[in-house]
Image: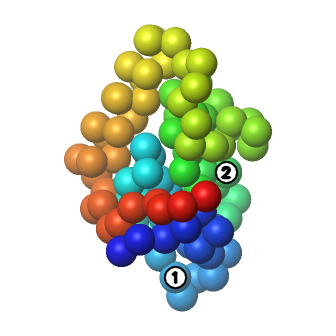
Amino acid sequence: MELTPQQLKNYDGSDSSKPIYVAIRGRIYDVTTGKSFYGPGGSYCVFSGKDASRALAKMSKDESDVVPSLDGLTEKEIGVLDDWERKFQAKYPIVGTVVGN
């Protein structure tokens, strides 16, 4: 499945009939089983329906960091993102990729 960033926003947990998706480095993960974290009101809901690569790398829940751009990240931050990506791969299925802008 391929989704644009705009289409990905439809999977933010606000519609309980749809799964919840979070993307990292353009790969979309179905995090619905982590609804208590990624669903509305959850501690990581800011990431839902978006590519959260930069925010995860920076360990940030600031809305302005919830973007796919890795520009200017330090080597340490890229390492943190690698760790997050491994955690997601172990826990959640990859269901597609983000395409276009």
**Residue visible at 60% across and 51% down?**
47
For the residue pair 2 and 84, the one nearer the viewer reads as: 2
Q: Secondary structure at mark 2?
A: helix
The amino acid type of the residue labelled 2 equals Val
**Residue visible at 64% across and 68% down?**
6
Q: Kindly indicate whether the residue at mark 1 contacts the one at mark 2 (C-beta within 8 angstroms).
A: no
Q: What is the crowding at mark 2: few (fewer than 14 residues within 10 Å), some, or many (at least 20)?
A: many
User: How far from the left and from the top, in percent, is residue 45?
Assistant: 63, 55
Q: Which residue is mark 2?
A: 46
Q: Is residue 14 left or right of residue 80?
A: right
User: How far from the left and from the top, in percent, is residue 59?
Assistant: 57, 27
Q: Which mark is residue 18?
A: 1
Q: Is residue 14 above or below residue 63?
A: below
Quarter placement of the C terminus? bottom right
Query: Is residue 49 shown to the viewer in this render?
Result: no
Q: CA distance from mark 2 to mark 1?
A: 17 Å
Q: Residue furthest top?
A: 75
User: How far from the left and from the top, in percent, is residue 73?
Assistant: 55, 19
Q: Secondary structure at mark 1?
A: loop
Q: What is the crowding at mark 1: few (fewer than 14 residues within 10 Å), some, or many (at least 20)?
A: few
